[in-house]
Image (tube, coloured by chain):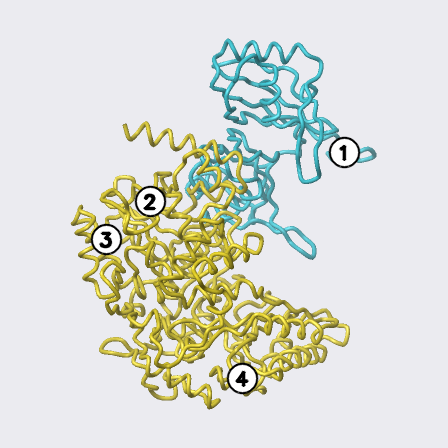
Chain colours: A cyan, B yellow
Amino acid sequence: MRLELRLAVRDRARFLSHLEMVDVLLAALRRAGYAVTLSQGMRPKPVISLALARGVGVASEDEHLAVDLVGEDLDPAQVLERLAATCPRGVVPLSCAPAGPKADVSGASYRLGFSAGAAELERACAAYRAVPELVVERSGPKGHRQIDVRRFAPDPTVADGAVHVRIAILEDGSAKPDEVARALQACADADLGRAAITRLAVHTAPRPARVGATETP
Amino acid sequence: MPCVEQHDLQERIEDLLGYVEKPSRYIGGETNETVKPDAAVRVALAYPDAYEVGISNQALQILYGLVNDRTPAAAERVYCPWPDMADAMRRTGVPLFTLETWRPVADCDLLGITLQAELTYSNVLELIDLAGIPLHAADRGPGDPIVLAGGPSASNPMPLARFVEAFYMGEAEEGLDRIVAILEAIPDRAERLRRLGELPYLYLPAQGDLPVERAIFTDFAIDTAPTHPVVPYASAIFSRASVEVMRGCTRGCRFCHAGTWYRPVRERPVEDVVRAGLEQLGCTGYDELSLTSLATSDYSGVERAIREIKAAKPDLHLSLPSNRVDTGPVALSAAANGRQRSITLAPEAATQRMRDIICKTITDEMIERAIDAAFAAGYTSLKLYFMIGLPLETFEEVQGIADLGYRAREIGRRHHGEGGRFTVHVSVSNFVPKPHTPFQWDGMAPPDQLRVKQDYLRRALRGRQLKLSLHDVRTSLLEAAIGRGDAITGDVLEAAWRAGARFDAWTEHHREDVWRAAFGAAGRDLEVEATRERGPLDPLPWDHVRSGVSKEFLLDEWYQSRAERLTGDCRWDGCSDCGACVGPVRNRLVEA
């Protein structure tokens, strides 16, 4: 049975990497007494996925977990309850429901908590929005890349003393929330401090039908 | 304002985690972690290596459970921070902290460090220093935790004697509660040490080299096995449930430290093994269970345990490490885990002569039968484990390893075909003499000689379906020089650590130049120390440590090795008078 769960990742658990989190969730499901369906083929893998990889150190209030559990008549409420009892500290299941139609992730919203005051943050956001392009450098195993974060996150605003920003996922990629934080810092007159980043929501859009595919009733 | 300070420390730790490799090494919070924030006595249990190595260590998991479940004290875990984190901690003034509460190790009553391998000793100094505890025991004051070390490598405490207040000899289950009781009842540090010094299994270097007895956990067979180990994050080297089915081994391999240090044999009842295994699977979420011991196929209840566990969990991946080389154990492994495609056999030596010297009671025929049984059972990866540099070794023994590798390939081809998809992995390590073994008087083979033999094997053993792996001579050399070291080795250790040595077992961090310079500064030579032979009458640095096995027995075994004669296993061939069994201490076997 395919289920969709929403999870929060809080406190120290935010330092778990994406793969570590998948492993933690698999073990928690086994402890809760559920078996995860294995994929077909030479090297079967558990059918489980987190919709959008979370950066190490980023907390989240909206992780989307899709998992296929062995069995057809599972009670989502019971899965939620049992999983809540077996997840480690900081990993909090919030809801569980039968999986709907597959959707693509179109973006995510973040809260960037800086130590600077609201006025300073307002000025930084205004400066950010005023420029047509904000390029930051991304370093990785394959070398360095220039990312224009303004294209993916055009409209940071201030609310509750923190910066809120929606970052889109486009065909050619996306920006990371810490890159947006760096760009904001570059636009600021003063030191904003280190950003405590929390993912507030993952946004999805229905997956477009494949060309030539026939719709089933 | 301790709360404010604690909050400040937590924020500073979080700041560091954003910049270091694998921050999950430092966050704690794993399933089955125990937090006792209000405990009056706090014990930091440290493994002097990275999280992924330390969390996989069964001994520390046992101690953690014992302290937290059976005493009022809180046990919290510490692993050696990786160099990037250690450097960042020093730069920002963050002291070593425990994973459970992120509180400073220096605020604990006791820092207990397990010594599982000599190559972690530089990390012991790293841990003490990062904690902000004075490096030398003599410089510590009333506010510092007592630094206590235990584990198998503590059987020669002398290289670390300057840095550690107390060494626990033997199996900690026996006396852990007494140590906690002393810490609970007595607030004064000096008085705590005085009382600890009265325990017969604790060696306190400050009291001089008084005789100290190894503690033997006589209740192993009746005590319940641990059932809720901490479940590591994904990076651990072992992620599986494990039940220790048996402690001790009396097969008497003359190179083996554990074979002496954990005598006699004590077997756990099958019912307890099965119950603990199933409970662990339930509360950890693992899909693999390992039945561990020094030689699991020797466990009298192994067949019944496999049968009952498989009946309860038919799809379970059940593994039996450390098996004897024969058809029976191979069949057991196959029965335990039908899906597993690889198996390890450890003949240790490839010729009958050398196996007689090291007292490995297996024959050429048994080895070939075991290999045949492994391939017949469908295994496609066979690992054969050998040592080179053993006492009295000739080139024939080295050639024998290559010959046996080829014989294994021939047998494999009989089962899988000439071009069949199978591999024979020949793994060759270097003999390192250990204290409290019959070979404690022998030196390690000179490194140049070992390298020549390794080169020979590289040329002699190549071809399809064959793989050869060789152990780094540099790390073996250091292990040998430290393992049989004395108090002056402590000077070497300190000099090497001050010059940057840490994580010596990790190839990327091993600094041979630093160690050579440190030995030189102490007026010693690394190779001379590692290869030094000692006479039967020479005093040994660990003579005051009584393992229970008499020195006379070890010396007699040394002579037996020179005569190329085997000694029987006392479980089946009668007592060999090693001295380990006294009063309630004796072999305790279960019904098959």
Chain that bears disc 4: B
Chain that bears disc 1: A
Q: Residue at x 58, y 22 (%)?
A: A181
Picture quarter with the N terminus of chain B:
top left
- Residue sitting nearer the eye, B160 or B584: B160
Which of the two discs, 3 and 2, sits closer to the camera? 2
Q: Residue at x 18, y 57 (%)?
A: B195
| In the displayed structure image, the side of residue A101 where residue B167 appears, left or right | left
Which of the two discs, 4 and 3, sits closer to the camera? 4
Pointer 3 or 2: first along the chain: 2
Residue A124 in the image: x percent, y percent?
Answer: 58, 12
- Label 4: how many residues lie within 10 Å, few (<14), some (14-19) or many (20+)? many
Which of the two discs, 1 and 3, sits closer to the camera? 3
Q: Amino acid type of disc 3?
A: Val
Which of the two discs, 4 and 1, sits closer to the camera? 4
Residue A215 tag number: 1
Q: Mark 4 highlights which residue?
A: B354
Q: How far apart in space, not on screen, are marks 4 and 2 (Cα)?
A: 48 Å
- Label 2: how many residues lie within 10 Å, few (<14), some (14-19) or many (20+)? many
Q: Amino acid type of disc 4?
A: Met
Q: How far apart in space, not on screen, are marks 4 and 3 (Cα)?
A: 47 Å
Residue A165 tag number: none
